[in-house]
Image: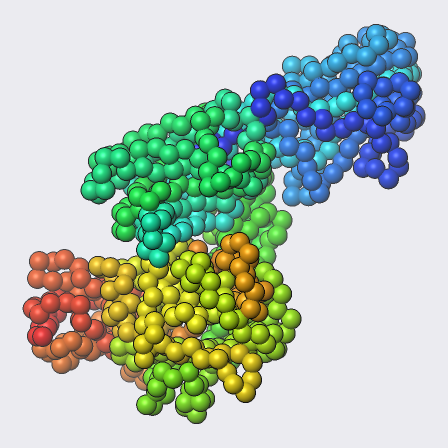
Amino acid sequence: MKMLRYVVFVIGLMASFAYGQSIQFESFDNMRPDTLFASWHDGPCTLVFTGDAATKKEGAASMKNWSVLAHSNAWGAASQVGMKNHTKPYDWSNAESLSIWINVTKAPTHPEVVSFRLQVTEDEAGADGEVWVYQNNTILDAAKGWVNLKIPLVERTPTDGSLSPDSSGFCIAPAAWGWPPFINKKFDANRISTWYLTELTITDVADSLEVYYDDFRMEGSKPVPVTIFNGVNFTGVVSGDAWAWGSSTVGIEKGIGVGGPLTNAVKWTQGTNPGWGADSGYTGWGVNLNSTNMVGSWNKDTLHFKLKCAPNGVGANDSLRVQLEGAGKKGKVFDLIDDDTWHQYNIAIKDLVFQDGTKSIDSAHITVFGIMAQKTGKVGRVIYVTDVWSGNPVFDVIPPVAPTGISTLGGNFTNIVSWTDVPNEVGAKYNVYASEKPFTSVDDSTVEDLPPYKIAAGVSSATHQLRSPKTDQNVTYYYGVTAMDQDGNIGAPGLSTAVTTKAKGVATIAVAPPAGIAIDGDVTEWETAGIQPIVISSVPKTGQGHVEGGVVTDDADLSVKSYIATDANNLYVAFDVTDDIVGKTNDSLIYSKGSYGVDGCDLFIGLYDWRGKRHTGYTKGATPDYHFRMTRFGALLDNNGKYLDHGTASYKWVEKVLTPGYIIEAKIPFQMLADSLGAGVSVFKPVEGMRIPIDYSINDNDDKNPTGQPWESREGIICYSPNNKDNSWQDMWKWSYTWIGNRWTAVQRNEGIVATSFELSQNYPNPFNPTTSIRYSIPKASVVSLKVFDILGREVMTVVNQYQEEGSYTVSLDATKLSSGMYVYRLESNSFALTKKMMLLK
């Protein structure tokens, strides 16, 4: 790939050693055959290496090498000994040099043609990659006693194979040696799988020498930039996607970065934690990092980042905290400028101080970067973050090519998608996409992204769990796979052909609750009504779920049947819980902050028709996500810490009498839910066929009293979604999904009616209050958009936005949140567009 390089503003979390630090990685004290030491020599040569406790520089022993260099090639001969380990490659990227002690006890007869070489190989997905070479032509010339050789960890340029090895640094193995593959032509000192200490001669005359080696180590401190967000995307050092906490949401917004429409920014929408009392303003976002060595960064580097925030009225002393975590936490509080203009913030890493009571940090393994508000969070406030950097990184801005060999193997209610990794893209990550229709761009609204994301090179496959409403049904999918390089560039997708596989029928949300339902802690009426429960169990044959943390031995220890239904105005939920020991604890800490520490059922649900892409965090507006914690204390809405219907006829918790366990029933008005999240949140109007994001976490306390944090009170936990892993409180994308009723879609297709023209009928009834139906026809399959505008031309509602086959359709429109008046509805498909007027009278 042609490399187009330029310097950009990025976050550079340097991996470096503290000033003057020296770290040994090989003492040569143990030279037993069962170690990882490996050797090689030309055929006629002889190499004997042993441990020697008598002649040493430090420690228990040194390594003694006796080499006979017999001519076998036109260029001479060589012998070498070293380490080879793909399981845990060496990371030398933070050191300025390598140091090794060398003692020549028998010098070569012809020192002018004998050299010492350090030859290293980079790890390439568990296999050998590029070879890089350092060479010193004098260190082996004569017996001088112990001599310390310093080897600079410098990449020599150009890296096209035209250089010969010397002592100024490392060059890529010369092309004339015939040792490529050349891959990225970068000295990737952070993933050295093999190093060899080599003795060689360039003559056809045999020679010999005896050399001792000891105390091989890294020395010095070198700032190494590691890109996290580069103004376009999160990069390879980031593991997974950004996450938010404290009711915040986070995602990437395109075209809003400092550089204009081609640059992006992280969009952080703040929330708060009302249930935390005086601490309610704590909220934030962050990313998990692949373990990053930052030891030297505290002395030498500065974090730079750019923020933009509109005026928010919080006050002139409003502040945020930037933070790094590695076992402990270090951060720095800074004042936020809220004038809707980009500002650059510069914080010396040495000025970061310990946070949240921690007193140490593993700076060699930094795993989290985050920004948070300290009691200053304000619901709905938006802060943009981009171009955060240190150092002066240079990287590729050309996206990788599409992965090839996309294939799909269907069976057992799953499709296994496989692909061939893009060659020469070191550290690339892969994402998989699916659609029921052919696609060429993963940005299409009908294309679904499949977790887990950022699949590492070498895995080359992903499993798509197939679900269908109620019964096992065939479903057809097309797949695409994209590659993202280490700099965040994402290429076009490699595409598959269609595959049809049987999907597993799953329990759905009932279109109506049991007739005459009473919230009384008795699920008999649910059973009598024939409503199929969602079964959450650690036993695969019983239901869906997995144990995540603690111990759940079997269904008698903990298992759940969850019944769920809607009517026009309410969400109905019931849990029939089998639990061998029902906890009686009533600890105040658990009640106020940690209801997840007692026996209870967490329900995660998105009250909207979900199609297409998943999202991080919880969203509000037209796609509100809700997280309930239902215990003996009540139904806690974790989004904002409010208790809903606690102690009223709309919520009931009852311990069972005849069998161990408890029952929960709740009736929750959609209007109350929308109001609890604040202005701009849509009131849910259920329609059969809506696909609903949903997940569960079931906590088992077994009557343990808290000994510290609330989560330490749990004996075990069962999670529903395979992606949950007790983390669904962070992100919607970790959830699973089901449907309302038995249909796949909420848009009703009028079967048997052939559409020969593009048509939009007048809504009926008209005038209406508050619902009406709209019928339309499309003669050709396409993405269809049906939107509503007020008389000033402002969009007020999206009714349909999805790919549809040719045919006639009828859709229901609910204008509950609109004011009385005249509106225009507009249908678009391909190059066609039609509009009509309608009248809402309340």
Look at the picture and state if 425 lies above or below 555. Answer: above
* Residue 285 sits above or below residue 762 on the image: above
Q: In the figure, is residue 370 to the left or right of 551?
A: left
Q: Looking at the picture, does residue 422 appear above or below residue 497?
A: above
Q: Residue drawn at (39%, 78%), measured in percent from left and top? A: 652
Q: How does the figure colour the protein chain or chains?
A: rainbow
Q: Is residue 530 visible?
A: no
Q: Quadrant of residue 423?
A: top right
Residue 380 percent across, percent down from the top left: 27, 51
Viewer-closest of 309 and 830: 309
Q: Is residue 612 left or right of residue 127?
A: left
Q: Between 717 and 775, which is closer to the camera in this rendering?
A: 717
Residue 342 at x, y = what percent? 28, 33
Please state which of residues 178 and 444 is positioned toward the viewer in this rendering: 444
- Residue 89 seen in render: yes
For the C terminus, the quadrant is: bottom left
In the rendered image, the vertical position of residue 99 relative to residue 613, given as above or below: above
Side of 624 relative to 159 (left or right): left
User: Could you tell me how many numbered marks the image carries?
Assistant: 0
Q: Which residue is painted at 91% across and 12% down in the image?
A: 106
Q: Residue at x 30, y 59 (%)?
A: 620
Q: For this view, does 454 lie left or right of residue 101? A: left
Measuring from the top left, give residue 642's x and y in whole percent. Answer: 33, 62
**Image quarter of residue 802:** bottom left
Residue 810 on image: x %, y %: 25, 78
**Residue sitting at x 71%, y 43%:** 87
Q: Quadrant of residue 518?
A: bottom left
Looking at the image, which is closer to me, 670 or 283?
A: 283
